[in-house]
Image: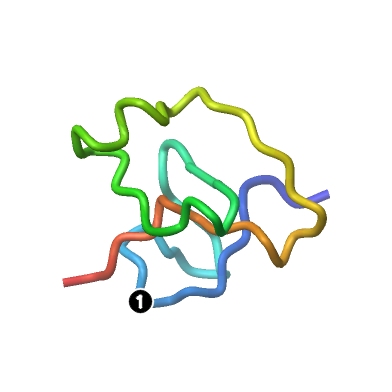
Amino acid sequence: MPEGVKCSVSNCTFWGQGNQCNANQIMVDIDKHGAVDYSSEFAEGLGMNHKDTAPQSSTTCCHTFKPKE
């Protein structure tokens, strides 16, 4: 079984050969919080440790994405 996290978003800083994600950590949230900037003060109330539920994978998003420069 292959190890690691697969990602096909090739314009991400953490994208690696063979569609491997090379990020040290991955932040996934539900689409409802898709626009939240967890590095800003506004997100403090929401926090990185909040819990949500998702009815299916299509209602989730990856906050780890960072465009390549």
When asked about the image quadrant of residue 41, the answer is top left
Binning the other alpha carbons within 10 Å of mark 1 as few (below 14), some (14 to 19) or many (20 upward) gives: few
Residue 1: give x, y in percent of width and height.
Answer: 83, 49
| Identity of the residue furthest to the left in this view | 69
Q: Position of residue 9 (x, y in %)?
A: 48, 74
- Relative to 17, 4 lies left or right: right
Image point (54%, 46%), residue name: 28
Instruction: Count the numbered circles shown.
Output: 1
How does the figure colour the protein chain or chains? rainbow
- Which residue is painted at 65% across and 36% down in the image? 52
| Label 1 element class | loop
Q: What's the residue type where badge 1 is placed?
A: Asn
In this rendering, the answer to whether 37 lies above or below 11 is above
Which image quarter is the C terminus in?
Answer: bottom left
Residue that carries the numbered disc 1 in the rendered image: 11
- Above or below, 47 relative to 12: above
Camera-side residue of 26 and 37:
37
Residue closer to the observer: 65 or 68: 65
Residue 14: x %, y % from top left: 37, 58
Nearer to me, 23 or 3: 23
Q: Residue at x 44, y 51 (%)?
A: 22
**Where residue 34 sits in the image (x, y, percent)?**
46, 57
Left/right placement of residue 23 relative to residue 13 reads: right
Where is residue 10, by image quadrant? bottom left
Image quadrant in which you'd find residue 40: top left
Residue at 56% over, 59% down = 31
Q: Taking 62 as reference, is 16 above or below it? A: below
Report the side of 55 relative to 34 (left or right): right
